[in-house]
Amino acid sequence: MKNEILKQLHVDVEQAEAVDDIQAKAMVDLQDAIQRSLDDSENYPTLIDILNQSISKFQANHPQLALSLRSAVDILSEGGI
């Protein structure tokens, strides 16, 4: 279940269009963090922190992505992570 959520989140980030270079880098960094967590679930706690930080970065220009990030945080947190 968690891996499916992360895979979908990875796609959502990939499909979002950055409005500037700073946001583009943030998206790449986010994709890297998601991939690390897909590769090793021990990275979930770090990913949750990164997702929480990313919500505010994308809220204004990508509200749907921010909502997806919040949902992923909720799902990962429900698992006791």
Image (spheres, rainbow, N blue to C red):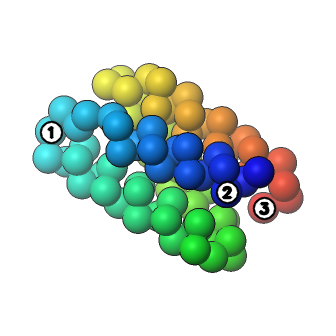
- Identify which residue, 48 or 31, lies in the foreground: 31
Q: Give the foreground label among 1 and 2.
A: 2
Q: How crowded is mark 3: few (under 14 residues within 10 Å), some or many (20 or more)?
A: some
Query: For this view, does 41 lie left or right of residue 46?
Result: right
The residue drawn where x is 56% and y is 34% is: 68
Q: In this view, does 64 lie above or below 13?
A: above
The residue drawn where x is 51% and y is 71% is: 36
Disc 3 designates what residue? 81
- Quarter assignment of residue 44: bottom right
- Quarter assignment of residue 45: bottom right
Which tag, 3 or 2, sits closer to the chain's start? 2
Q: Give the foreground label among 3 and 2.
A: 2
Label 3 – label 2 distance at C-alpha = 14 Å
The residue drawn where x is 45% and y is 44% is: 11
Which tag, 3 or 1, sits closer to the chain's start? 1
Q: Is residue 55 above or below residue 78?
A: above
| Percent of width and height locating residue 75 | 75, 45
Disc 1 designates what residue? 20
Amino acid type at circle 3 is Ile
Amino acid type at circle 1 is Asp
